[in-house]
């Protein structure tokens, strides 16, 4: 894992963000041990912000503290991910329900653009790029919905799913998602709000079925 020193030493959020990304992308492997001392040295900062970042990641279930002050990246939990997919699907469906009445033409254009980016990333075998494009697609609904509580709830569940996506990625699964997104976009254009909500929820649930 390549870590560059952080210039703004007081910003523990930067440590949190860097570690979280490395865990989600499996750069830091499940079960890998983490040392706050070593991480502080590699980031070029004191141990306090590192410890705070690790505590936050532990609260989100991405790392585990073991007896003897040992810390490790949490293993992939299949049953936990199964439950997380149900929650994430429901939250994204709720965001779509709130967003549909206020979606603009520019929003639909963004959905089309992000789905195109997803398709290109899949064809290139870019797992992380595909995951990020998919996230941008659904972010259009979250932004339009304007409900920070949905975003906060997703922040706790999504990383557990994203690690599974990276570990189990196949182009077949990704292309299925692209086709489902096309259906969502078509329903948005027709202003078929209930269809959009249903298709968004099915998109997440079907992905969970494929991965688990």
Image (cartoon, rainbow, N blue to C red):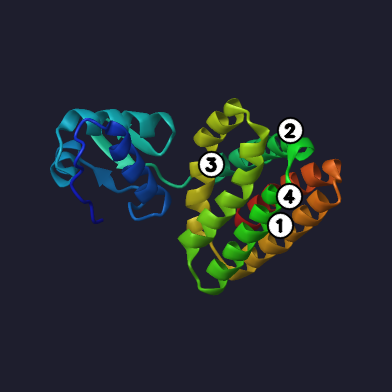
- Residue 201 lies left or right of residue 162; in this view the side is right
Instruction: From the viewer's side, name the closer residue of 16 and 33.
Output: 16
- Please name which of the two marks, 4 or 1, marks the residue nearer to the observer: 4
Disc 3 crowd rating (10 Å Cα; few below 14, some 14-19, many 20+) is: some
Mark 3 and mark 2 lie on one chain; the one further toward the N terminus is 2
Where does label 4 land, which residue?
105
CA distance separating discs 3 and 4? 28 Å
Mark 4 and mark 2 lie on one chain; the one further toward the N terminus is 2
- Please name which of the two marks, 3 or 4, marks the residue nearer to the observer: 4
- Please name which of the two marks, 1 or 3, marks the residue nearer to the observer: 1
Disc 1 crowd rating (10 Å Cα; few below 14, some 14-19, many 20+) is: many
Instruction: From the viewer's side, name the closer residue of 110 and 123.
Output: 110
- Residue 46 lies left or right of residue 61; in this view the side is left
Q: Position of residue 159 (x, y in %)?
A: 48, 43
Q: Residue at x 54, y 37 (%)?
A: 157
**What secondary structure is marked by label 2?**
helix
Mark 4 and mark 1 lie on one chain; the one further toward the N terminus is 4
> Residue 153, located in which quarter of the rendered image?
top right
Q: Position of residue 131 (x, y in %)?
A: 53, 56
Where does label 1 land, which residue?
181
Instruction: From the viewer's side, name the closer residue of 132 and 205.
Output: 132
Whether residue 134 is visible here, answered yes or no, is: yes
Instruction: From the viewer's side, name the closer residue of 148 and 77.
Output: 148
CA distance separating discs 4 and 2? 16 Å
Disc 4 crowd rating (10 Å Cα; few below 14, some 14-19, many 20+) is: few
Q: Residue at x 67, y 34 (%)?
A: 145
Where does label 3 land, which residue?
158
Q: Position of residue 91 (x, y in %)?
A: 66, 35
Cβ atoms under marks 3 and 4 closer than 8 Å: no
**What secondary structure is marked by label 4?**
helix
Residue 46 disc label: none
């Amino acid at each position: 894992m390549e870590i560059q020193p952080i210039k703004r030493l007081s910003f523990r959020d930067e440590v949190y963000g860097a570690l979280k990304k490395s865990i989600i992308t499996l750069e830091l492997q499940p079960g890998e041990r983490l040392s706050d001392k070593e991480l502080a040295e590699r980031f070029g900062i004191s141990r306090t912000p590192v410890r705070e970042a690790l505590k936050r990641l532990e609260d989100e279930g991405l790392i585990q503290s073991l007896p003897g002050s040992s810390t490790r990246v949490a293993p992939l939990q299949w049953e936990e991910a199964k439950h997380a997919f149900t929650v994430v699907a429901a939250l994204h469906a709720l965001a779509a329900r709130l967003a549909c009445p206020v979606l603009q033409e520019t929003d639909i254009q963004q959905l089309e653009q992000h789905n195109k980016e997803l398709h290109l990333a899949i064809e290139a075998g870019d797992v992380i790029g595909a995951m990020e494009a998919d996230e941008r697609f659904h972010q259009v609904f979250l932004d339009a919905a304007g409900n920070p509580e949905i975003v906060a709830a997703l922040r706790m569940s999504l990383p557990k799913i994203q690690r599974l996506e990276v570990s189990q990625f196949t182009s077949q699964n990704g292309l299925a998602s692209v086709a489902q997104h096309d259906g969502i976009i078509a329903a948005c254009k027709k202003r078929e709000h209930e269809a959009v909500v249903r298709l968004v929820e099915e998109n997440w649930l079907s992905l969970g079925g494929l991965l688990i």
